[in-house]
Amino acid sequence: MKRYKIKFITFFKNLILLLRPHLVFGFIQHLFLTISNTIQLSRWISAQSKNKLLINDFFDWKRDHYKRYGLYQSVLNILNEEKAAFNYLEFGVCRGESFKWWLENTKNSEHLMVGFDTFEGLPENWGVFKKGDMNAEIPLIEDPRGRFVKGLFQDTLPSFLKEGHLTNDKKLIVHLDADLFTSTLYVLTTLAPYLKKGDILFFDEFNVPNHEFFAFKMFCDSYYIKTKLLGAVNNYYQVAIEIE
Ligand SMILES: C[S@@+](CC[C@H](N)C(=O)[O-])C[C@H]1O[C@@H](n2cnc3c(N)ncnc32)[C@H](O)[C@@H]1O
């Protein structure tokens, strides 16, 4: 029976490929992807309702960008209790608003804080934003704990990792604010060997179904990563997630 089923599926699949469906249905590909990812996102959000979160405003019609600082602070309060130095990596710095928040609100002189960006804007179109949008001067900072790495993550992250800063004795805080699916997936998969229990991921556009959420989902599924949501604001636009 199984043999006939496989034969039928193979025949049907080959027939579909022969008919070149992209020529007729190509225009609805993005819509289908969005529907599929939105369903997955909604399922993921529902599954979080049983967790006790540090902060969560779901559901609120009004988006307030400054709420993200409340999320950072609620996680930082826990990190401060632990009193240990951590490594903070931010992917997507632009003018440095979030990076500067982390520099200004953390005092431990042993923290390493590194921000990565092309500083030439997005490498691809993202929704209404075009390639090259969000370009910015490298922010000026005077804190010796912080530094920036200019270039595509895909070019700069491997050599940064070879410098050997990411040791097991320090918690890793990864702030993913590159907006794009490709950039986010690249960073997560490249950092996979360095991520350990207790490390924390921040996302800045998590509830965009085809980008940060999709990259996170692909990453967790592919690497069998278990996570725990710590907090969410702006209806899961910004989230903090702990690696289990
Ligand atoms: C939304 S902005 C970051 C905003 C910043 N975290 C803040 O809140 O102030 C996104 C940034 O990601 C950067 N970016 C996206 N993909 C990248 C990649 N593959 N390599 C380097 N930079 C990237 C863009 O250049 C852009 O400056």
Image: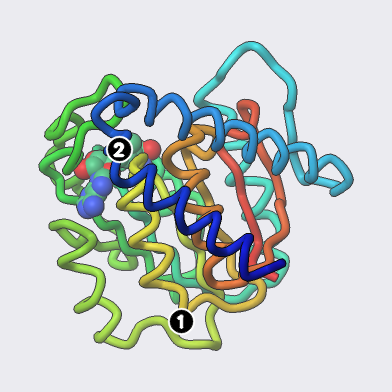
180 or 98: nearer the viewer:
180
Numbered disc total:
2
Which quadrant of the frame does ligand 1 lie within?
A: top left
Q: Is residue 90 above or below residue 237?
A: below
Where is residue 126 drawn, in percent x and y?
Answer: 28, 31
27 or 89: nearer the viewer:
27
**Looking at the image, can residue 100 be seen?**
no
Which residue is drawn at the image coordinates 63% and 40% (left, top)? Answer: 40
Please, what is the three-letter code of the amino acid marked with disc 2?
Leu
Residue 41 placement, left or right of 10: right
Q: Is residue 221 above or below residue 38?
A: below
Where is residue 63 drawn, in percent x and y?
Answer: 56, 18
Q: Assign a secondary structure to mark 1.
A: helix
Which residue is drawn at the image coordinates 42% and 40% (left, top)? Answer: 211
Where is residue 62 drawn, in percent x and y?
Answer: 61, 12
Q: In this view, does 149 lie above or below 93?
A: below
Where is residue 155 drawn, in percent x and y?
Answer: 15, 66
Please, what is the three-letter code of the amino acid marked with disc 1?
Pro
- Mark 2, residues whose alpha carbon is within 10 Å: few (<14), some, or many (≥20)? few
Nearer to us: label 1 or label 2? 2
**Looking at the image, can residue 132 be seen?**
yes
From mark 1 to mark 2, how far is it between C-alphas? Answer: 42 Å
Residue under circle 2? 19
Image quarter (top left, top right, bottom left or bottom right) of the C terminus: bottom right
- Mark 1, residues whose alpha carbon is within 10 Å: few (<14), some, or many (≥20)? few
Which mark is first along the chain, 2 or 1? Answer: 2
Residue under circle 1? 193
Q: Assign a secondary structure to mark 2.
A: loop
Question: Residue 6's image quarter?
Answer: bottom right
Residue 141 placement, left or right of 12: left
